Amino acid sequence: MIRWLIVTLLALVFISGLRPWLKKLGLGDLPGDFRFTLFGREFFLPITTTVLISVVASVIAKWL
């Protein structure tokens, strides 16, 4: 279970880093992608985008 938590957190960090590129594709503004400001810093939690990308990756992996 801890392995999946680590993988999910790494995916969130990875997707947050790709945020400008994903925004061009329209994936950064889905319902469930949280953006908030705390202590003057903006934080972005792309939960829905992470789930969508993982579903697409699993479908591709099953086809291969």
Image: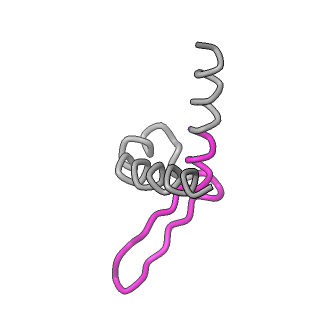
Q: Nearer the viewer, residue 44 or 4?
A: 4
Q: Nearer the viewer, residue 38 or 2?
A: 2
- Name above or below for residue 12 compared with residue 26: below
> Residue 25 at what x, y percent from top left?
47, 37
- Name above or below for residue 40 compared with residue 42: below
Which quarter of the rendered picture does the N terminus lie within? bottom right
- Name above or below for residue 14 compared with residue 38: above
Horizontal side, residue 28 vs residue 17: left or right: right
Residue placed at 56% from the left, 65% from the top? 34
Q: Is residue 58 magenta?
A: no
Q: Is residue 36 magenta?
A: yes
Horizontal side, residue 35 vs residue 17: left or right: right
> Residue 12 at what x, y percent from top left?
47, 54
Horizontal side, residue 37 vs residue 34: left or right: left
Residue placed at 56% from the left, 38% from the top? 53
Pick out the residue farthest to the top.
64
- Name above or below for residue 21 compared with residue 39: above
Residue placed at 57% from the left, 47% from the top? 49
Pick out the residue farthest to the bottom.
39
Residue placed at 34% from the left, 83% from the top? 40
Q: What's the image's color scheme?
A: one colour
Which quarter of the rendered picture does the C terminus lie within? top right
Q: Which residues are magenta?
A: 30-53
